[in-house]
């Protein structure tokens, strides 16, 4: 009796705060996560949490359901919920994985599809290394291209332009901006990225970074297939958002500071760019460049970042995570 009274009082408090999480009247949602490694084998004993969501009157509140995967790598969770659930999976020796699921409709008090099976791939932590990691969109002041119609080198280790425009010593990327600007509704601009050395270059990797393993791109940079140039155009034509040619789910692997011996590649530094190489010509006399890069300076093709940033004394907002 006392226990029932206590539960009743707790719910009253939740109701008075506008945050009762019992989900009375909501349909029940149920999902099964199947956790596997990169070769498709089940991952047993992974810690897993599912956050089903409920309306509180002042937004939404997650209802956590947690446990561990079984021998088949499976875990099933259910709760009364709106049509959305998120999940996160952790296990020692693996990179964390995460994602979300949206139900389509409900019937007879259940969200459909009922109990869908969702595969979650976990990638092993193998040989992570420190890197130079920056998001130029988080640098203060913003990184502005120094001049129009000039090829200007950018040093990834210094995160700065080469002399005479900055403190950089190596032209890892060479940016050239061409720009006609009459107003924010009438402009045309092109950004071209090229490279200084014969074997330098980049290549596109298509990968959605919004869900799945925190470490998504390839472990090792390819030995060949690098292109010498990438070009993006951004145009303003009347009212509305500017038009650009950025690719969906586009990321890059790059090779810089390449050295050759007897006409062949001897060694180089490799890295990756999460997302597009973007530029903003609307709020500057030239344009700001915005891209998130990771550079491995050890002259191997390893792209597995250990979270230890070789840039020192970064502000909290300048810090860069693994892949997201």
Image: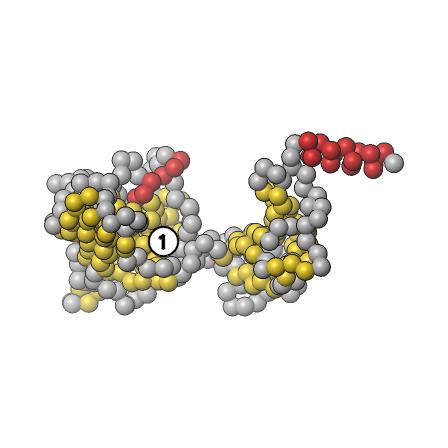
Name the residue rendered at 23%, 52% in the picture.
Answer: 237
Kindly indicate the quadrant of the structure image that contains residue 14: top right
Residue named by callout 1: 274
Is residue 185 shown to the viewer in this render?
yes
Residue 315 pos. (x, y %) = 36, 34
Please report the residue visible at 71 percent of the width from the left and 59 percent of the height from the top.
108
In the rendered image, the vertical position of residue 190 relative to residue 288, given as above or below = below
**Side (left or right) of 268 relative to 83:** left
How dense is the environment of label 1, judged by Cα within 10 Å: few (below 14), some, or many (20 and up)? many
Answer with the quarter of the image where residue 183 lies. top left
Which residue is at the front of the view, 290 or 179?
Answer: 179
Query: Who is closer to the viewer here, 58 or 322?
Result: 58
For image coordinates 24% across by 49% down, the residue present is 238
Position above or below: 84 against 224: above
Residue 159 position, x and y percent, is: 26, 43
Element under disc 1: strand
Q: Which residue is drawn at 23% across and 46% down?
A: 185
Q: Quadrant of the N terminus?
A: top right
Snapshot quadrant of residue 219: bottom left
């Amino acid at each position: 009796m006392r226990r029932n009274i206590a539960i009743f009082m707790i719910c009253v408090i939740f109701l008075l705060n506008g945050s009762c999480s019992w989900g009375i009247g909501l349909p029940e949602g149920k999902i099964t996560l199947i956790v596997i490694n990169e070769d498709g084998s089940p991952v047993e004993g992974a810690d897993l949490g599912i956050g089903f969501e409920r309306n509180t009157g002042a937004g939404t509140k997650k209802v956590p359901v947690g446990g561990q995967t079984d021998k088949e790598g499976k875990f099933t969770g259910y709760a009364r919920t709106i049509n959305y659930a998120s999940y996160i999976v952790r296990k020692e020796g693996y990179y964390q994985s995460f994602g979300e699921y949206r139900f389509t409709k409900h019937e007879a008090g259940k969200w459909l599809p009922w109990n869908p099976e969702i595969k979650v791939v976990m990638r092993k932590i193998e040989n992570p290394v420190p890197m130079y990691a920056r998001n130029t969109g988080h640098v203060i002041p913003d990184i502005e291209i120094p001049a129009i119609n000039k090829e200007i080198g950018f040093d990834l280790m210094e995160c700065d332009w080469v002399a005479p425009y900055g403190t950089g010593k190596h032209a890892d990327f060479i940016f050239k901006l061409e720009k006609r600007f009459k107003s924010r509704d009438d402009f045309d601009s092109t950004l071209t990225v090229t490279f200084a050395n014969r074997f330098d270059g980049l290549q596109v990797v298509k990968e959605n970074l919004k869900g799945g393993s925190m470490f998504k791109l390839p472990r090792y940079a390819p030995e060949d297939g690098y292109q010498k140039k990438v070009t993006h155009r951004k145009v303003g034509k009347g009212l509305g958002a500017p038009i650009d040619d950025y690719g969906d789910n586009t990321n890059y692997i790059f090779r810089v500071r390449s050295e050759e011996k007897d006409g062949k590649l001897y060694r180089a530094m490799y890295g990756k760019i999460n997302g597009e190489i973007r530029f903003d010509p609307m709020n500057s006399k030239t344009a700001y460049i915005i891209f998130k890069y990771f550079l491995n300076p050890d002259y191997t093709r390893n792209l597995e970042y250990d979270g230890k940033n070789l840039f020192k004394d970064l502000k909290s907002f300048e810090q860069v995570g693994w892949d997201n």
